[in-house]
Image (cartoon, rainbow, N blue to C red):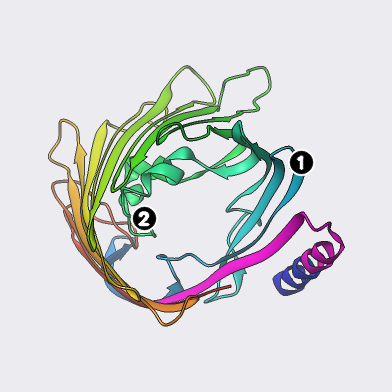
């Protein structure tokens, strides 16, 4: 069922691209990646085992999409993006078909505004400071909003003024009888000047019932010197609407770009549950080796440690105080 749909989408894109005016363009793109995974202490129904499997890649999640633009004149252009995730190890689609985004918008001297299902500002901004790619701070219980999509949303980015850019996102809750229940609001600001980059975001979402809110504030910075880039990111959450305790997370990371075909990243990512010793941290070393501009290998080595009653895990249900070691080797190809 998925194969004919992809073929139809690709055919439609090619036909449209041929018929479009010279100032219009539509591109089909994507990534296909798989990982060999070995993970210890994978708890299911209270029992622990080692998991050995072939999974869809997490460092570069598999996906395909259509994106395009049309020059409307006067510096104004129309844009759109449709992107779907998939699991190449099984051939299955990932939930909602356009689960990775479906939006249309306008871009010009005023900035850019888009409408639809979109990645949030945290994903746009904080993934430059927190390490992302599957095994990341957003895997912690209280920090999923560090990278997520928002339905029924409007997102605006201003032009850059002296290296400063502002952003705002609003997701409509669309609940009968209420204009704010279930809504999402995010604000962001970034500053870039030479080797220095700084970002700040704030997220809040309202409960479907009642006045409680989930709040998440994040701050990140990076500085490049020679072949190295140092990163520091911090976030604090107060998820009252979700019934979670206050928590903080931080990421100390460094990236090495010593060779054109190799990237290495080392991160220490901690989670601090406020007023409790039930904390967690993990250390992650990731390597990416490019065979070409489109094809390469990736590898991750991760050690996750829980203290007290903390039960965080990348695989399985997790168990209080238990650690988990994850090793992955994968191949990816982009088009």
Residue 90 or residue 322, whichever sits in front: 90
Q: Residue at x 18, y 61 (%)?
A: 323
Above or below for 225 versus 276: below
Residue 283 or residue 25, whichever sits in front: 25
Q: Is residue 236 magenta?
A: no
Q: Residue 250 appears at what percent x and percent y? A: 22, 43
Q: Quadrant of the C terminus?
A: bottom right
Q: Which structural element holds mark 2?
A: loop
Q: Is residue 38 visible?
A: no
Q: Name the residue beneath numbered marker 2.
A: 132
Q: Residue at x 48, y 45 (%)?
A: 148
- Label 1 and label 2: CA atoms lie apart by 37 Å
Above or below for 96 versus 264: above
Q: In which quadrant of the rendered view does residue 288 lie?
A: bottom left
Q: Residue 18 appears at what percent x and percent y? A: 83, 66
Q: Residues within 10 Å of mark 2 (few under 14, many from 20)?
A: some
Task: Give the number of the disc on residue 73.
Answer: 1
Q: Is residue 303 visible?
A: yes
Q: Residue at x 67, y 17 (%)?
A: 177
Above or below for 276 versus 86: above
Task: Give the number of the disc on residue 140.
Answer: none
- Magenta residues, start to end: 12-36
- First reached walking from the N terminus: tag 1 or tag 2: 1
Q: Residues within 10 Å of mark 1 (few under 14, many from 20)?
A: few
Q: Residue 101 appears at what percent x and percent y? A: 61, 50
Q: Are marks 1 and 2 in contact (CB under 8 Å)?
A: no
Q: Quadrant of the N terminus?
A: bottom right
């Amino acid at each position: 069922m998925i194969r004919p749909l992809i073929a139809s989408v690709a055919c439609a894109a090619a036909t449209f691209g041929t018929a479009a005016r010279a100032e219009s363009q539509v591109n089909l793109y994507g990534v296909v990646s798989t990982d060999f995974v070995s993970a210890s202490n994978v708890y299911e129904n209270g029992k622990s085992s080692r998991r050995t499997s072939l999974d869809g890649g997490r460092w570069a999640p598999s996906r395909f999409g259509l994106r395009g633009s049309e020059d409307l004149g006067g510096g104004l252009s129309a844009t759109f993006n449709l992107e779907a995730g998939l699991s190449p190890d099984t051939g299955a689609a990932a939930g909602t078909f356009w689960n990775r985004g479906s939006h249309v918008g306008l871009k010009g001297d005023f900035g850019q505004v888009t409408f639809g299902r979109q990645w949030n500002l945290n994903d746009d901004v904080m993934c430059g400071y927190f390490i992302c790619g599957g095994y990341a701070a957003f895997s912690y219980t209280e920090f999923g909003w560090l990278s997520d999509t928002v339905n029924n949303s409007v997102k605006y980015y201003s032009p850059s003024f002296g290296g400063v850019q502002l952003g705002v996102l609003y997701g409509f809750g669309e609940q009968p009888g209420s204009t704010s229940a279930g809504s999402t609001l995010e604000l962001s600001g970034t500053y870039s000047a030479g080797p220095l980059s700084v970002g700040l975001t704030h997220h809040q979402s309202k409960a479907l019932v009642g006045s409680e809110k989930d709040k998440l504030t994040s701050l990140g910075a990076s500085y490049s010197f020679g072949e190295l880039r140092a990163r520091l990111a911090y976030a604090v959450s107060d998820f009252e609407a979700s019934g979670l305790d206050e928590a903080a997370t931080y990421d100390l990371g460094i990236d090495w770009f010593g060779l054109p075909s190799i990237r290495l990243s080392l991160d220490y990512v901690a989670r601090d549950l406020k007023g409790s010793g039930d904390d967690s941290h993990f250390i992650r070393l990731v390597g990416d080796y490019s065979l070409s501009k489109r094809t390469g290998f990736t590898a991750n080595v991760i050690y996750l440690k829980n203290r007290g009653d903390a039960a965080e895990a990348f695989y399985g249900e997790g168990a209080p105080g238990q650690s988990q070691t994850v090793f992955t080797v994968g191949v990816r190809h982009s088009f």
